[in-house]
Image (tube, coloured by chain):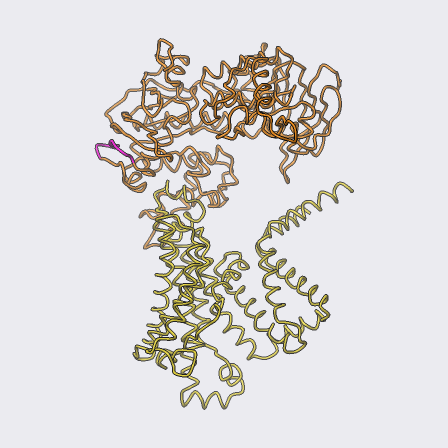
């Protein structure tokens, strides 16, 4: 244990418990000054917990933290800030109706005489910082009016304004387009060159390879190892992360699509603000086919799904399943027409967390003939079905029939939903962000299930913000931008960069409209 | 310590701790104001248990708040806070009185008709709240409170109507005897009077009290509600809506419909409570200066019951016991009977902050572990 000056951050023997659950067990982390250091781990491995300990949000039960070789007790984020640590959270903490400058100086505003706010000085300081680090952003724009990538820059600038020397970025690429990700990586390098230390939390291997020099891998709260990124492959990183070898590719045969099962015809849907979120959108899904919709969050995906599900009204257009129109009916009618949806938000839309697994298994079918008799629930039939589902989809623990859904891991919760939806024997299965928040093993499983259902002849619509997912799972890739499908490709005929351009509203010759 | 923390999370522990805290706070206040807590509690106990008559009176007092408690419990299972139970209770009494005075069918039919009328009135009253919530998103607490006042003044208005108003009084006529409770009609009958006179026990428990069959109906209602919630498909849909509206909607369960249904059933229970008050105890309604709080006490019952239908029976009995027995504290040692209200308030308060108990235990546990 060398508490050298060359390390910006050293965390030794950190143990953090939540009740009886050990989130971090004797964790170590040594981050060299001026380096980009990534922390890799699956969801729930303890990455964020470790960073929250470093940032003073959590107090560890055991362990020591050294900043620039000096031991520091991180009692609160204020202490962390005093020691030059800044954090950019996954979910931005910005005030939408404030300008960029106002957001950056918020809480540390320059004041003139008599405590009057000096916005001129504030703007000058902000401009100085943007110039110094080459982070172009309009200081007068309203945060609501700038892109997500720009908002992230504002977050970074906020940390730099507070003279952070050590920047923690929590899953910084989750909301960015491929182009924006490249820009971010460029910024990270620039910051590192100017002497800042950057810690990136992520589970995306590709980006680690592109950006980081060192990578500390953690698994289930335990330190695995720290590697020199240039000397390992993505596969090796993945294997260390999950503890066994993994396949990063999805195994599947080429699609042999059949007849059109599901068709959307010139659909228009308004969002909550009354603006057209889905505009004149048309789409076809055939049997034996997975259609993937790629796009950046907020381009109408949410409204599209809600309109199909019958949760919101469509302003115009038709939604047809097996030739029958279902737009502007009820969710029940849509389900009865054999459209099953794996909703994006498991906890809000997919499950009733306070219900046990068996109750969740029959959430849509509780009053079917199979599960009810004269208005009473048929607990025996429900129990049999649930046991079958638990067995067929390998839900763990295997005796969870009467455990509350809230106690299961994300992957197992998703298995219940997938099992339930597939049990409806749908003509069309819609999966919205089906692997969000899942670990690698569970992601593999979900993809396998989608391909299996396709092979059984189902029509499948996959809507995902993860470009990699769409590219590897879908047979047809359609890009959604500003509420319309702007372009469709067959799998394999398009690369990430081209898709990224379409996702950002550009076209193949590279212009962005 | 960990085990202790776990025990603290159990509903029954919370309930017992809350009740103990209620007594503790009451004891402190009594002591501070110069009364002996021990004496006061002894008198409270005597006031509840020392005579069969007292026990019967507690049961009679418990009946309406068990039912309004159930009303609140049921709505709460669907995620609604039915503060309108008071108003639903009142419209139940109004319609019960109107039917009881205007109609005169054979005994059992009249009795059942009054109950049905009270339930229907409460159900429709609740449905207004549910409808406004479902269609326009108006919060049920706002509409509930407003409708409480409308019901309250409507009751006072009905008392003034010539058709119902008993001259030279501040109340309506009594309902026709055919609509009165079976036990009441028994003790008023020739043979009943004879039987009551000859048996000291009957005289004590029936003759001198308002004992009525309401408690049986309340217990049956509690069991029925439990069955509906746990065993039926309707209950499943209602609970789904209660726990997670979005998931319910996505699963094809109509939130709007179930919110309205829940408020109807909830209102029917409160209305039944009102109707049973008319058939079993008061037989009429009076001009009032303030609400009688049967609905509001239902909120306390539901809280203490931890939102369990069966628990509402016991919570109702406990509160009724405190209120009834508390009366004797004032008459015997002169301590103000408001001490009982403080106690009930404290109990509800501690149930509400029950989440703190396991947290405190965990904190203490850590401190102990650190020292050790």
The outermost residue toward the top is A509
In front: B271, or B288? B288
Q: Position of residue A393 (x, y in %)?
A: 43, 34
Q: Position of residue A420 (x, y in %)?
A: 39, 38
Q: Is residue B269 magenta?
A: no
Q: Position of residue A35 (x, y in %)?
A: 63, 14
Q: Position of residue B186 (x, y in %)?
A: 41, 83
In front: B227, or A57? A57
Q: Is residue A192 left or right of residue A250?
A: right
**Residue lying at 42% horizontally and 35% vertically, measured from the top left:** A392
Task: Identify the chain drawn in yellow.
Answer: B
**Residue lying at 46% horizontally and 46% vertically, measured from the top left:** A355
Q: Is residue A105 above or below residue B286?
A: above
The outermost residue toward the front is A113
Q: Is residue A319 magenta?
A: yes
Q: Magenta segment range?
A: A314-324
**Residue lying at 46% horizontally and 54% vertically, measured from the top left:** B81
Instruction: Locate the C terminus of chain B and report the quarter of the image it occupies.
Output: top right
| Quarter of the view holding residue A156 | top right
Instruction: Tell me the colour chain A is drawn in.
Output: orange
In front: A54, or B193? A54
Q: Is residue B61 above or below residue A112?
A: below
Q: Is residue B312 left or right of residue A163?
A: left
Q: Is residue B64 above or below residue A94?
A: below
Q: Is residue A464 visible?
A: yes
Secondary structure predominantly adopted by residues drawn in magenta: strand
């Amino acid at each position: 244990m060398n508490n050298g000056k060359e390390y910006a951050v050293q965390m030794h023997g950190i143990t953090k418990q939540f009740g009886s659950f050990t989130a971090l067990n004797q964790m170590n982390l040594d981050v060299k000054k001026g380096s980009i250091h990534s922390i890799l781990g699956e969801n729930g491995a303890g990455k964020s917990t470790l960073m929250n300990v470093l940032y003073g949000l959590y107090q560890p039960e055991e362990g020591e933290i050294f900043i620039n070789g000096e031991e520091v007790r991180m009692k609160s984020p204020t202490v962390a800030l005093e020691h030059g640590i800044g954090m950019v959270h996954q979910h931005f903490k910005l005030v939408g109706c404030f300008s960029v400058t106002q957001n950056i100086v918020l809480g540390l505003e320059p004041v003139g005489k008599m405590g009057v706010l000096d916005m001129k000085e504030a703007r000058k300081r902000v401009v100085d910082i943007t110039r110094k680090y080459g982070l172009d952003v309009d200081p007068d724009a309203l945060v609501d009016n700038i892109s997500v990538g720009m908002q992230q820059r504002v977050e970074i600038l906020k940390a730099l304004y507070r003279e952070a020397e050590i920047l923690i970025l929590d899953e910084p690429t989750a909301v960015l387009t491929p182009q924006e990700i490249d820009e971010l990586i460029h910024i990270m390098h620039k910051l590192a060159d100017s002497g800042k230390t950057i810690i990136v939390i992520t589970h995306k291997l590709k980006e680690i390879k592109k950006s980081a020099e060192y990578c500390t891998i953690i698994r289930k709260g335990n330190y695995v190892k720290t590697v020199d990124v240039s000397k390992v492959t993505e596969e090796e990183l993945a294997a260390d992360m999950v503890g066994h070898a993994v396949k990063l590719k999805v195994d599947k045969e080429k699609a042999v699509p059949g007849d059109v099962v599901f068709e959307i015809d010139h659909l228009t849907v308004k969002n909550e603000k009354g603006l057209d979120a889905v505009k004149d959108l048309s789409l076809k899904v055939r049997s034996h086919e997975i259609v993937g919709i790629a796009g950046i969050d907020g381009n109408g995906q949410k409204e599209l799904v809600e309109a199909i599900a019958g949760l919101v009204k469509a302003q115009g257009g038709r939604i047809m399943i097996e030739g029958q129109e279902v737009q502007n009916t009820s969710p029940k009618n849509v389900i009865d027409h054999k459209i099953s949806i794996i909703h994006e938000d498991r906890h809000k839309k997919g499950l009733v967390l306070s219900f046990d697994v068996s109750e969740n298994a029959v959430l849509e079918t509780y009053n079917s003939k199979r599960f009810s008799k004269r208005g009473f629930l048929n607990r025996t039939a429900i129990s049999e079905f649930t046991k079958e589902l638990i067995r067929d989809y390998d839900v763990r623990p295997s005796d969870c029939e009467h455990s509350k859904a809230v106690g299961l891991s994300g992957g197992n919760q998703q298995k219940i939903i997938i099992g339930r939806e597939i049990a409806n024997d749908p003509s069309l299965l819609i999966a919205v962000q089906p692997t969000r928040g899942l670990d690698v093993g569970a992601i593999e499983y979900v993809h396998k299930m989608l391909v299996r259902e396709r092979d059984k002849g189902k029509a499948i619509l996959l809507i995902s913000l993860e470009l990699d997912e769409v590219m590897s799972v879908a047979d047809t890739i359609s890009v959604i931008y500003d509420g319309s499908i702007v372009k469709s490709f067959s799998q394999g005929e398009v690369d990430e960069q081209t898709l990224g351009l379409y996702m950002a509203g550009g076209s193949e010759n590279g212009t962005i409209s | 310590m960990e085990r202790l923390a776990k025990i603290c999370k159990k509903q029954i522990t919370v309930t017992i701790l809350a009740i103990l805290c209620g007594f503790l706070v009451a004891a402190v206040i009594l002591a501070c104001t110069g009364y002996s807590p021990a004496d006061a509690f002894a008198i409270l106990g005597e006031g509840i248990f020392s005579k069969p008559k007292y026990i019967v009176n507690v049961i009679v007092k418990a009946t309406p708040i068990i039912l309004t408690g159930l009303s609140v419990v049921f709505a709460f299972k669907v995620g609604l806070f039915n503060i309108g139970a008071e108003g639903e209770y009142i419209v139940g009494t109004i319609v019960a009185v109107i039917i009881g005075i205007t109609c005169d069918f054979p005994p059992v039919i009249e009795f059942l008709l009054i109950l049905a009328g009270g339930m229907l009135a409460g159900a429709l009253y609740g449905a207004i709240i549910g409808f406004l919530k479902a269609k326009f998103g108006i919060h049920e607490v706002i509409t509930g409170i407003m409708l409480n006042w409308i019901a309250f003044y409507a009751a006072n208005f009905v008392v003034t109507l010539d058709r119902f108003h008993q001259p030279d009084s501040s109340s309506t006529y009594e309902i026709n005897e055919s609509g009165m409770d079976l036990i009441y009609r028994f003790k008023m009958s020739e043979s009943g009077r004879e039987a009551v006179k000859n048996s000291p026990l009957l005289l004590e428990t029936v003759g001198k009290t308002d004992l009525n069959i309401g408690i049986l109906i309340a217990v049956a209602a509690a069991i029925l509600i439990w069955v509906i919630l746990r065993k039926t498909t309707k209950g499943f849909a209602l609970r789904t809506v209660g726990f997670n509206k979005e998931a319910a909607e996505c699963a094809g369960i109509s939130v709007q419909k179930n919110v309205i249904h829940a408020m109807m059933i909830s209102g029917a229970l409160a209305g039944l409570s009102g109707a049973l008050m008319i058939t079993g105890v008061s037989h009429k309604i009076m001009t009032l200066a303030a609400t009688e709080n049967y609905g509001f006490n239902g909120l306390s019952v539901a809280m203490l019951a931890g939102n369990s239908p069966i628990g509402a029976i016991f919570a109702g009995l406990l509160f009724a016991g405190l209120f009834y027995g508390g009366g004797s504290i004032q008459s015997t040692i002169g301590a103000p009977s408001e001490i009982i209200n403080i106690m009930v308030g404290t109990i509800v308060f501690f149930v509400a902050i029950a989440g703190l108990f396991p947290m405190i235990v965990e904190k203490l546990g850590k401190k102990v572990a650190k020292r050790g």
